[in-house]
Image (cartoon, coloured by chain):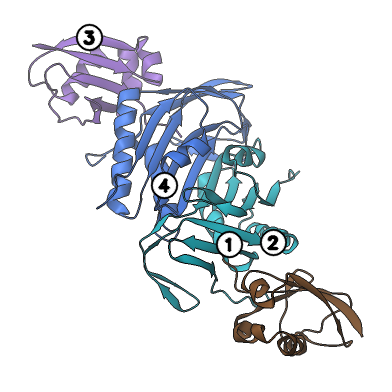
Chain colours: A cyan, B blue, C brown, D purple
Amino acid sequence: MKPTFPTIFSITEDEIDINKLVEQITLTSTGAAAIFTGMVRGKTTREGHAQGIAYAPHDTDYLEYEAYIPMAEEKMKQVADEIRARWDTIEGIAIVQRIGKLYPRTPTVLIACTASHRDTGVFEAARYGIDRLKEIVPVWKKEFTPSGEEWVEGEYMPNKND
Amino acid sequence: MKPTFPTIFSITEDEIDINKLVEQITLTSTGAAAIFTGMVRGKTTREGHAQGIAYAPHDTDYLEYEAYIPMAEEKMKQVADEIRARWDTIEGIAIVQRIGKLYPRTPTVLIACTASHRDTGVFEAARYGIDRLKEIVPVWKKEFTPSGEEWVEGEYMPNKND
Amino acid sequence: MHTIKILFFATFRTRAGMSSMELEIKNGSTVGELKEILVAKIPALEASLHHTLLSINRDFAFDEDVIPEGAEVALFPPVSGG
Amino acid sequence: MHTIKILFFATFRTRAGMSSMELEIKNGSTVGELKEILVAKIPALEASLHHTLLSINRDFAFDEDVIPEGAEVALFPPVSGG
């Protein structure tokens, strides 16, 4: 009999507790967890672009995150479902987005996937999870820098399969 | 000027605090962390083999880990150096092996790598780190099952480059 | 006619100057038609409308989709979470 | 002659019945020669000797390596940490 595999997703203003989240998706059969966390960068040195507009290396004072919470939760569930459809070895999945005013070095997002062994796709599943979250989960951030404030806009345009 | 990049490695009998370890390798320029943790499996369902000997699905009561501590620390440092030689984008590295008597669902090992962005090799670096740890870091575990106890032996035979 | 709820997020909230509104639309109206109505009401939205994401009842929707009765519609820019 | 310290781990500790010993060896002795001396002293080690890992001063060493004076040598099975 297949055990029930835990799926956790949340939008929260609270600190992300990695220990606790990993514990919640660890079953008796679990031997491996791949976890991704993203943090607020205080210094960005790589040139980049968002929505076709180039941005130079710059400093960030803080970010303010907002979410369309009920849709974000549904889309997080969808990301988890997509992961399970691609890697049937995955046992537990946790997806958390922190919102509110967040300062450099603070973890803002977490994706964790567990499996019995490390060679079963856990790393790929976690990578897929964060990539998809950044495409389809409705969360936005406003960046506050020494020279002003600006909404950061993504680039991905969803299609009917998203 | 390149900031000093933190490298943490330890063999410990204490609980692995993922939050704290990630915090310790997060710089102002850090935007991404890929973390691997391994846990004691209470139930192993996959058939496997160690040292050419097949093992069947089985239950585990607990594991007892021992390490050749000074060499393990040197080899952990070597793993970190190898990671940095392969991915010059990596900022912080943490490698921790917990030893002693450890029960199912308990994290026993952690590898975490940070970088400015997630597409710079953090996932690959963490994967490389756990693979190398399991090849060259002198740690062994004894498995206690309902039917007895047995040393688990690895398969990898080091060469002059290890 | 039926009433829908419209939510605005991020830049769209700033441009619209509000976070939500209720609007009466004709039965059978599509997303494309709704966008035209909204731009007529709130000209500030026009500039970014080619780069709008729109959801109906918390799922992405597209110009040809018909808006169901009493729908919760949201307008927002490409997401930038993580 | 010089004295080296030998450490045994995991199965090798069990087989040797000790976790360490001190041993006098000839100057210029190699790892291969040390293994022969050890098997002569502790026959229980022989069975696993083809699958032994050996380190000198905390780095992996191989049969042809000469053991330096006062070395810390360790014998153990392939590692199984993680």
Q: Are marks 3 and 2 on the same chain?
A: no
Which chain contains the residue that carries disc 2? A
The image's mark for residue B113 is 4
Which chain contains the residue that carries disc 1? C
Q: Are marks 2 and 1 on the same chain?
A: no
Mark pair 4, 2: CA separation? 28 Å
Question: Which residue is disc 3 drawn over?
Answer: D22
Image coords of residue D2 (percent x, y): 11, 12
Question: Which residue is disc 2 drawn over?
Answer: A72
The residue type indicated by label 4 comes to Cys
Q: Are marks 1 and 4 on the same chain?
A: no
Question: Which residue is disc 1 drawn over?
Answer: C81
Q: Residue at x 34, y 55 (%)?
A: B89
Q: Answer with left or right where residue D68 lies relative to residue D15.
A: left
Q: Are marks 4 and 3 on the same chain?
A: no
Residue nearest the viewer, comparing C54 with A160:
C54
Q: Classify 10 Å Cα crowding around label 4: few (below 14), some (14-19), many (20 and above).
A: many
Q: Answer with left or right where residue C55 lies relative to residue D68.
A: right
